[in-house]
Image (cartoon, rainbow, N blue to C red):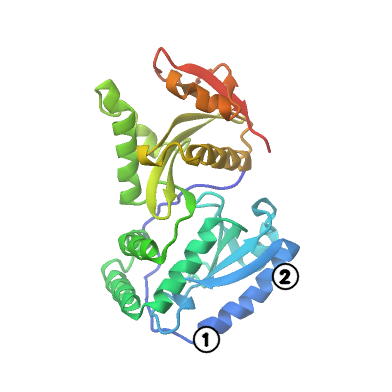
Amino acid sequence: MLKFNLEMTSQGPTIEVVPYDPAWSTMFAQEAALIRTALGKNCVAIHHVGSTSIPGLAAKPIIDMVPVVKDILHVDAKALEAMGYLDRGELGMLFRRFFTKGISERTHHLHIWEEGNPEIDKHLLFRAYLLENPAELKRYEDLKLNLAIKYSNDQNAYTLAKDDLITEMLEKSGFQGLTLVQALTEREWGKVKYFRQHYFFRLLNIEDPYTRTFNDPSHFHIVLRKGMTIIGYAHLQFWPEARAALRMIVLEESYRNQGIGQKFIQFLERWLSHQKIKALHIQSSPEAYNFYKRNEYREMPFEDPEGYQSHPKDIDMGKFIKE
């Protein structure tokens, strides 16, 4: 099973944003050649991304790279570890393999994605947007310099504080891909709480009684984004014996009846197959029954090991996940 913990430790080495160094492009080229060899025929391309890829932009001196592979499940982690990389799993970004190099001082980050994943375009469009808009590049640089002072020993706070501006710039870049992440930022958690209360617990005239699941490692709160707009939410729970429960799945009303719901559940099923989950269980409302039937779910005992209360009209359904 792939690693997927969010690893939300805040303390770490001092954050240092330094002036642009022309040697960064050479460092990328040298490392990319080694990574291409390590990944072998699975490697399609390697892109230099992040601040060190943009001439003139001050940055943390860490080379961010996006290796693109044919099959994310066949990334040769041992070959990368032999080069000094540490396998960090997904760290909340579904379908990513993330590796870091350097223990006391980071030197390289690998964000490995499978070809066709919209996250690749997101990295490239963000880089292109900054290269084409000098005023925006200055805004981004000023923010990074200020945050490096404000959060000099808090990597998590530094990263999260950039989220609003990065989101704004990605929206301007034209990025429109469908991507999934585990809720991490304040904006993402705000939407999680909104979806749960507005579409589920408001209808029962109660406040969400299951917020404890937000900090339970067996529960996964996943948001679906179109571009940078959060349009959907799913709550998954992993059970023993390679089973999982889909506790909730919902789209904003304006995005329904466009085929996005089907794509959403297919994304989730594919991710679950990567985690070696064999069966996905749901309790469907009568209104959603036909949607699940169209997606090959059948009536199946739910057998909830934790005994959550469901609506008496809900229908127990499930599906065996294909590898």
Q: Is residue 273 above or below residue 69?
A: above
Hey, which residue is sitting farthest right in the picture? 41
Q: Which quadrant of the view contains residue 197?
A: top left
Task: Give percent across and percent down for residue 255.
Answer: 40, 41
Task: Give percent across and percent down for residue 120.
Answer: 54, 62
Label 2 sits on residue: 37
Please identify the quadrant where the C terminus is shown. top right
Q: Amino acid at mark 2?
A: Thr
Q: CA distance from mark 1 to mark 2?
A: 22 Å
Task: Give percent across and percent down for residue 268.
Answer: 54, 39
Please identify the quadrant where the N terminus is shown. top right
Horizontal side, residue 323 vs residue 175: left or right: right
Q: Quick check: can you spot residue 195? A: yes
- Dot 2 lies on which element? helix
The local crowd at label 2, few if under 14, some if 14 to 19, many if 20 or more residues have their Cα within 10 Å, is few
Horizontal side, residue 267 vs residue 163: left or right: right
Q: Which quadrant of the view contains residue 250?
A: top left
In the depicted view, which residue is nearer to us: 52 or 104? Answer: 52
Task: Give percent across and percent down for residue 156.
Answer: 37, 59
Q: Amino acid at mark 1?
A: Ala
Q: Which mark is residue 214?
A: none
Q: Quick check: can you spot residue 285? A: no
Q: Is residue 122 above or below residue 52?
A: above
The local crowd at label 1, few if under 14, some if 14 to 19, many if 20 or more residues have their Cα within 10 Å, is few
Hey, which residue is sitting farthest front in the picture? 257
Label 1 sits on residue: 23
Tell me which label, 1 or 2, sits earlier in the chain.
1
- At 36% from the left and 40% from the top, the residue drawn is 254
- At 62% from the left and 43% from the top, the residue drawn is 274
